[in-house]
Image: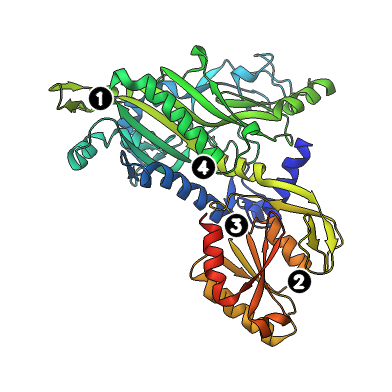
Amino acid sequence: MNENLMNKILSLCKRRGFIFQSSEIYGGLSNTWDYGPFGVELKNNVKNAWWKANVYERDDIFGMDAAILMHPKVWQASGHIDNFYDLKSDCKSCKKRFKAADLKDPKRCPECKGELTEARPFNLMFKTHQGPVEDEAGLIYLRPETAQGMFVNFLNILDSKHPKLPFGLAQIGKAFRNEVTPGNFTFRTREFEQMEIEYFVKPGEADKKLEEWIDYRFNWYLNLGIKKENLRKRPHTKDELAHYARACTDIEYNFPFGTSTSLECHGGSFDVAQDASAKDAELAEARSRTIGWSELEGIANRADFDLKQHALVSGKDLQYFDDATKEKLYPYIIEPSGGVDRSVLAFLADAYSEEKVNPVRNRSNKPGSDISNGVKDDIRVVLKLHKDLTPIKVAVLPLLKNRPEIVELAKKIARDLKKCFITVYDDTASIGKLYRRQDEVGTLYCVTVDVQSLEDKQVTVRDRDTMLQDRVGIDNLKKYLWEKLNN
Ligand code: GAP
């Protein structure tokens, strides 16, 4: 079921313009994805919902947008140059590179059985050069996390906003990691977007604030419609903590992976199908294990690691002056760090549903009934995305496209609604097919203009989830939809 589900989501994403493979006409760039017309709307809605909950609805968090390119010393201070690597072995015959931790036999290539080199550290940061000369002096990195852009601006925020502890910084932006084993669609890619908060607290309050943030972030996903049974909290064991973290809890989603045989493990993955010695039973077991719980967001207590490190390397005083005690201190940092692309994937997977409907030819308000004009199938695919996330809120559809008065009225209504809600107009199929198309992309309300509308100045509004229909006066339509969308 789950493997099937992931295939269906992949197919829907491409067919309906949510997500495409990057550079597809050139055969694609593996594990790199482009967001299409519906995908970009969904992604923006996820980011806007995050910004609203974490910046606009709070008094203690400021937004930021730091540059992707940063001074190379940032990565020295952060520990990324020394600690952000995987041990890798290269095959001397086929030249492929493997993560040492994933290898069953550290001496033999899992693909061609050639001899492997000794495991060597391989830094996950993308390197490039600033300026016209490609030498060591111009070496810079694409940031592997957005977090550092906030730590290095700590002093600027103290000087410009004069905040009192606890307070935080929030940022959404691209990050890059040269992952050796990316995969599972948009789950693990080399270019991705993060939504991160760095929340500065008094050291004695860090444990309490960590727990508060874990609950606050967990509830954010639930409030946006993720089913409770698909979300869980998983505290890290001591040996899996990152070099900067005292404690960390992951919010995990039960992802429906199944199209690959890649085993997810912390910080990477292992593809059993790449292992020529794997037996069918092992592959089957790997497939069953790939369906499941994986990290959506991590909430860490980074203690005073980052500010102390940047103070040490930059030579600047990055302490906070506490007015009450008249003492200087390094605040501890609580960091909720989530992925935009992973959230989008989780919201899509959670919203995808198939429902058996009772096909009827005409308008019916019986539960489970749907207009079937032009549709043979009695299964409808619906993306039950939360109203704040769904790309399109309203679709205006003329019942008869060969009646110019109906088309004209429908277009006029659509033009008017566009000023208030994300609205589309469509007359390219029969009404039954148009409904199904809108269901598939999660459109909340379909407004149908029919012959009767010309006389009684009313339209039919169909609700995506219940399929129930209301007859609403055109004059009252905006108010009706506004109330539905804002309750
Ligand atoms: N600043 C802390 C930090 O970066 P992380 O656990 O490495 O922590 C945070 O990353 C989040 O970023 C993850 O929970 C995940 O949602 C997202 N993420 C990390 N690597 C990713 C990748 N290769 N592809 C897609 N998303 C990724």
Asked whether mark 4 lies closer than 8 Å to ligand 1, one says yes
Please name the residue that numbered disc 4 is placed on. Answer: 340
Label 3 Cα crowd, 10 Å radius (few <14 / some 14-19 / many 20+): some
Between marks 2 and 3, how big is the CA–CA gap?
Answer: 20 Å
Mark 3 or mark 4: whose residue is earlier in sequence: 3
In the rendered image, the vertical position of residue 423 relative to residue 307, given as above or below: below
The residue located at (39%, 35%) in the rendering is 197
Nearer to me, 257 or 395: 395
Please name the residue that numbered disc 3 is placed on. Answer: 38
Secondary structure under the numbered disc 3 in the rendered image: helix
* Amino acid type of the residue tagged 4 in the rendering: Val
* Amino acid type of the residue tagged 1 in the rendering: Val
Secondary structure under the numbered disc 2 in the rendered image: loop
Secondary structure under the numbered disc 1 in the rendered image: helix
Label 2 Cα crowd, 10 Å radius (few <14 / some 14-19 / many 20+): some
Q: Where is residue 380 in the image (x, y as percent from the top left)?
A: 78, 54
